[in-house]
Amino acid sequence: MIIAIKNSTSKEQFENLIAWLETRNVSVHISKGEYQTVLGLIGDTRNIDVELLEGLDIVQKVTRITDPFKNVNRKFHPDDTIVSVGDALVGGGNFAIIAGPCSVESEEQIIAVAKSVKQSGATMLRGGAFKPRTSPYDFQGLRAEGIELLLEAKKETGLPIVTEIMDASHLHLFEEVDVIQVGARNMQNFELLKELGRTKKPILLKRGLANTLKELLMSAEYIIAGGNENIMLCERGIRTFETYTRNTLDLSAVPMLKELSHLPVVVDPSHASGISRLVKPMALAAAASGADGLMIEVHNDPVHALCDGAQSLTPEQFDDVARCVNKVLEAIK
Amino acid sequence: MIIAIKNSTSKEQFENLIAWLETRNVSVHISKGEYQTVLGLIGDTRNIDVELLEGLDIVQKVTRITDPFKNVNRKFHPDDTIVSVGDALVGGGNFAIIAGPCSVESEEQIIAVAKSVKQSGATMLRGGAFKPRTSPYDFQGLRAEGIELLLEAKKETGLPIVTEIMDASHLHLFEEVDVIQVGARNMQNFELLKELGRTKKPILLKRGLANTLKELLMSAEYIIAGGNENIMLCERGIRTFETYTRNTLDLSAVPMLKELSHLPVVVDPSHASGISRLVKPMALAAAASGADGLMIEVHNDPVHALCDGAQSLTPEQFDDVARCVNKVLEAIK
Amino acid sequence: MIIAIKNSTSKEQFENLIAWLETRNVSVHISKGEYQTVLGLIGDTRNIDVELLEGLDIVQKVTRITDPFKNVNRKFHPDDTIVSVGDALVGGGNFAIIAGPCSVESEEQIIAVAKSVKQSGATMLRGGAFKPRTSPYDFQGLRAEGIELLLEAKKETGLPIVTEIMDASHLHLFEEVDVIQVGARNMQNFELLKELGRTKKPILLKRGLANTLKELLMSAEYIIAGGNENIMLCERGIRTFETYTRNTLDLSAVPMLKELSHLPVVVDPSHASGISRLVKPMALAAAASGADGLMIEVHNDPVHALCDGAQSLTPEQFDDVARCVNKVLEAIK
Amino acid sequence: MIIAIKNSTSKEQFENLIAWLETRNVSVHISKGEYQTVLGLIGDTRNIDVELLEGLDIVQKVTRITDPFKNVNRKFHPDDTIVSVGDALVGGGNFAIIAGPCSVESEEQIIAVAKSVKQSGATMLRGGAFKPRTSPYDFQGLRAEGIELLLEAKKETGLPIVTEIMDASHLHLFEEVDVIQVGARNMQNFELLKELGRTKKPILLKRGLANTLKELLMSAEYIIAGGNENIMLCERGIRTFETYTRNTLDLSAVPMLKELSHLPVVVDPSHASGISRLVKPMALAAAASGADGLMIEVHNDPVHALCDGAQSLTPEQFDDVARCVNKVLEAIK
């Protein structure tokens, strides 16, 4: 860690700072310049609070050289992590296709979608039981009942299931769920992350709407620090000023995350744009960028079918996307 | 609600959409134009899902005319809500000054700060017991013990206390806490908001780092929908591209929120910039913009004192700020 | 255009607004609701100033249904525009590969790079002569001399050349340039756009760092309104909160722009991330997303070669990228 | 400047980098750590290109310790710059109130507004002659004729005039203009900035919609590097995700800019929100935050008066704002 100190700093303030830093078990290397003095901290700087230092009046700038994440860092774990979910593998050259409806609505619906996506090559079934909604007046999901229906679909098709958790107190309902999804709005729900770290369940951790890759990795670090290494990172679009698309899919996150971390990276092109006709080009682009998997919304219900709709694909459209994705994966091998 | 339909829409798709809309208990007014057809929905459109409609291939644009929030809306409740906390009132012309350290560290610390800020005119004491930290390796707060120490300081000074909750399962620890704070990262932790709606405790709801005012009001709507009307909104800085300050304080949020809602609006200038020397100008500006209160960090501990530091003020600096804030409040009366 | 009027509006204000709107040659359709009155404007609303209306105290919301761009709009011009540059075609199924150094530095350099990229399949040569730099103390490019050197390289290789203009007064220097590039920072330099509209030269218009697709298309509309239809749109990354990459490449812009407009869309993966090792995955992803071309930095100079560096590829790396891009183009056909 | 080098760097690459750095006239101090090697550059690092270094594969991170701006930096020029415009002074305790219509529309209009704002205490008259508009079909201003009308109003009232330039080739029209405004969209029109640096005219430089304070100061550095020190910086709102206001006024920019630079800082609360009823609270907040002046839109024309509207104040509203601003200035003295 590098700390630049203003030259207006008094001798006493300076000595106090050095003394305090030395209590944190780092050694301090001092170089004096014309306009500032630069301190180089050597040792384990993870327990030095950057925000505290940055706020000090005598400090001009603090730069952390070492990444603050450790167990998810590829530097300390060069090989790809491969997450195993039922028969499906994710990472290390294994590509996952997770498909299913936005919300679980009925047994008939979820089983029909599950059968159809399986046939098109999906390796896992997704479906929302607990739904985070901006408005308290919007449909909040079938909750516990939705999980039951997903388990029925799993029994019918053998597909492992992925569904979102919204509160640590619901964890007992997820015992038979194969992958627990943490949604974008809960990416920094640290108490939830700690609880998930204590399980051994595979976790699909979505990037928050305005969060950086470093923050995503720090949230994964919360889970891994608890002992659970089965983590898939998920890019699902970030908030930008663009309004034609609901969010902006950040595909440069894929190669960057894979460079920084050994964890597999899955892309959700459905939520990113909110527009079904963008799902195919973005799914192909995600595959071309090196992603380890895709998470795609597929529906079979009449409300969506109504107008060929929403951010979900029909089973026929999904089948076409899955086929083209495989061609791109073949091309970039 | 206004829905623009593309002219490429088939007669069957169009009729299906109208039929579906009519099942939602709204009446539909149709006007055909050269390049699109515009539907005007009349009736209670709150159970029409805008995102679903926007995603339909036949839909060009959806515009909600009515605000989606209702119980926090000033239109339906023109008078200012006045939140009462012990002897302190907030809103409707009553100005609150909430002061205290970032984290509760010891009995000695919290009592000394409480006494000192009370003398300078603070009306409530703040202090962090549960601390949301980006890194699992950073100090997570004294947790339950921190709340005990705050209650000690309350007993000594009579100041009502404000402290942050991070998970609904901790709620039993907050029984004697006067104001429960919801932090920026939990603004859309909807399960937590629902639980807080079931209490009668005053809630200080902080705006998320990249959230809009509409989203903040929708989160307040979650609390009020559960029956709890004691809500203070808090602007604490949003994420922008600026790097000299940690966040950007959005003071236009103050008059805008007060126009949209009857709830009081408190400003936190300490977290917004992360720099103690900006706290005074931003506190004065917040008062001049019409805020109902301020939340300011004050410390008395040697680590911060070390270099006149961080985003916290010393008791002497806080005393100066409080005096100047009162002058500005007098000037704009 | 839809205008929602507050119900607090006086009869006189309301009638004044209607009278004023009618002077703008639109007819007004009025529907009164419980909380607001909605006006539907029928006719050519392009000369109604949305910002003026939005600012009126009696107006709650203004929604433009029709896109404000017209000549670049695919609705009025369904077929793909194909821009022809020397022997190269861009758009309508023709894929362009524009390659070359960030800055033109010497005759030797530019000719060597031109020869090498031509051999790898580049269809145009790029090179900066006028360089926009954040600091007045940074190298500003070889300017007029740089253009001379590009023309030398064109003579040697036959490759058409692309280079950036920074001020309308330099236009006489661009007479033999094949494609004039407008940089991100000049996307809304409207006086420059008007001048370029008066030429017949192909223009490569880069999206501004924080601009929306609508703003990009409105800037293209400035050029086309002057009579010049030879425009290529270029996505080159937008500013987000992410810091591991310099900018965030927005690939959903590709299918979205191609849906909204008939103009070809080129992607610049080099500037987007600022990191050479991300150029390949992002170039492949851009091709998979449906782009009409790529613009890639290639260097052969020792400063960059020094450490295999910067955002530029070596000729060997570029050759590999070009080959893989062709495989992806083949796969998605 | 601090450069962190990856430990995977070969000896040859490392030595090449050191050799290249030494050709830039800086001396290099090397400290080897477990996971990276840190280089400290000592000397004038302004001609080291950070972006080039950041892009190198062997470089992990580059941190500039010294601010890249020099002549606008308060460190090298501790006293406040006071810009003198006719009888008006701006900065160093002198507060400017610049008022007038968004666009100059007629002689009658501009003279009437000029007289009225002068009476309320305005120290300069503003009015748009050249208007930057997103759409080529929107009114582009009276251009040269608008400047003539402003000069008439100046003759009538003695108020110095402020108006925007959009292209360096128009400079001859600005000879009698007192303050040349550079708009947000031209903040990084570097060729224009260079031209303005060659004049001695006071320049009002507006912050771009998505630009940082460092970029604003670098643009001011372009002007001052040419020899013109008469610069006022202007905060006018930045683009954020908020939609209730057109832009977000960043008032923390005021104390931050005044700490970083000796130049005066003016705030434009009219453009920031685009809503006239927010102008008063934001003007008071700007004054309380320590600004050196305000720039406020005032109209007297019937289209705006129509509904008491837009982002402009009526002369009566402006009179009230000016009076209250003076009270706040008195209170914070």
Image (spheres, coloured by chain):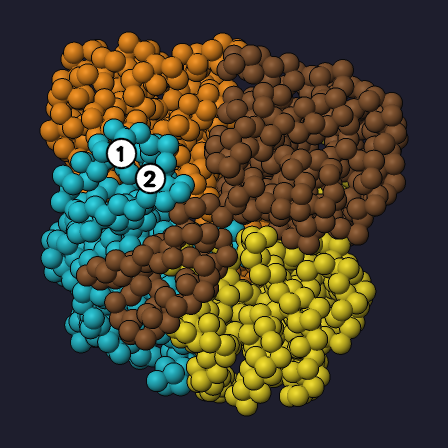
Chain colours: A yellow, B brown, C cyan, D orange
Q: Nearer the viewer, residue C206 or A200?
A: A200
Q: How many marks?
A: 2
Mark 2 crowdedness (10 Å alpha carbons): few <14, some 14-19, many ≥20: many
Q: Amino acid at mark 2?
A: Ile
Secondary structure of the residue carrying numbered label 1: helix
Residue D20 is left or right of residue B58, and the answer is right
Counting from the top left corner in percent of width and height, residue D3 is at: 58, 51
Tell me the residue at 57%/79% (across/down). A109
Which chain letter matches label 1?
C
Q: Identity of the amino acid at label 1?
A: Phe
Q: Which chain is mark 2 on?
A: C
Label for residue C5? 2
Label 2 to label 1, Cα distance in Å?
Answer: 8 Å
Q: Nearer the viewer, residue A46 or C105?
A: A46
Asked whether the viewer can see residue A88, the reply is no
Q: Position of residue B237 (x, y in %)?
A: 57, 38
Q: Is residue C326 above or below residue C282?
A: below
Label 1 crowd bin: few (<14), some (14–19), many (20+), radius 10 Å: some
Image location (x, y in percent) of residue C13: 27, 30
User: Mark 2 or mark 1: which comes first in sequence?
Assistant: 2
Q: Is residue D266 visible?
A: yes
* Residue receiving disc 1: C14
In the rendered image, the vertical position of residue C13 relative to residue C66, given as above or below: above
Residue at point 61% right, 56% down?
A185
